[in-house]
Amino acid sequence: MIKTPIFITNFKNCEQSTGKNALELAKIHERVALETGKTIGICVSACDIFRIAQEVSIPVFAQHVDPIDFGSFTGQILPQNIKNSGAIGTLLNHSERRLSNEVLKDSITYAQKASLARIVCAESPEEVSQFSEFDPDFLAFEPPELIGKTNVSVSSEKPTSIKESVALSQGIPLLVGAGINSPKDIKVAMSLGANGFLVATAIIKSPNPEESLKNFVSVME
Ligand code: G3P
């Protein structure tokens, strides 16, 4: 059972958050989690999961898995291998890795079979409603046009959509993300009912990721 509210940094495939740099960033996240007692997870490249999961105690998520079991599937990401490598869950259907509804449903099934928690991303409140039927552990509302922004965010631009998404999520915990760049964004989204956050740029590209992370989670009640 993953405790909420949860703050998850999506490491994507940035230079600052892959390979050796990913491990250092992961350790920063662990340090802040231990110091603050907040639930902090990281969502890392499949290439980095095994090493990172061996070295940190915080929840590690994959960014994607494919709907496959053991077998001859060259180049695909096997959910059971992600689990065996030490991840506890996976993102699915991120805006940068969109899936058809059929593939998404299958991916959820295979991830569940491998005992991975499933965070299903949605681009609108309508998709939140639709994907809530697919049996995810978390839904994540991320308006794609706000991803990577540093001066506007889902909280500043889409408060009504956050509220709607919470109402349409059928009790499934709802994360929000896209452009989150200040503690105020966290506070606003929480006041609207969000149960957690997916953040990338504001941590990965921060001149001081540790400080930024502390600032964000300090207002996460
Ligand atoms: O999954 C989180 C991500 O898409 C949000 O990115 O850079 O807007 O925080 P960013």
Image: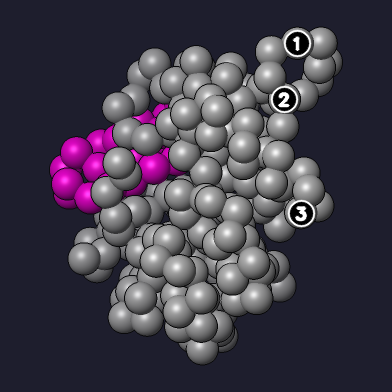
Q: Regarding mark 3 in the picture, which secondary structure is present there?
A: helix
Badge 2: residue crowd in 10 Å (few <14, some 14–19, many ≥20): some
Question: Which of these two is toward me, 209 or 175?
Answer: 175
Viewer can see residue 174: yes
Q: Give the range drawn in magenta.
A: 22-45
Side of 48 where 71 appears, left or right = right
36 relative to 173, above or below: above
Residue drawn 58% across the image and 17% down it: 81
Q: In which quarter of the image is residue 86?
A: top left
Outermost residue toward the bottom in this view = 160
- Using residue 72 as the reference point, say whether residue 143 is left or right of it: left
Q: Mark 2 points at which residue?
A: 68
Vertical placement of 217 versus 68: above or below? Answer: below
Q: How is the image coloured?
A: one colour
Q: Earlier in the sequence, mark 3 or mark 1?
A: 1
* Rendered-image quadrant of the C terminus: bottom left
Query: Which residue bears the numbered disc 3?
Result: 101
Q: What element carries label 1?
A: loop
Question: Ligand 1 within 8 A of label 3's CB?
Answer: no
Q: In which quarter of the image is the N terminus?
A: top left
Q: Mark 1 points at which residue?
A: 71
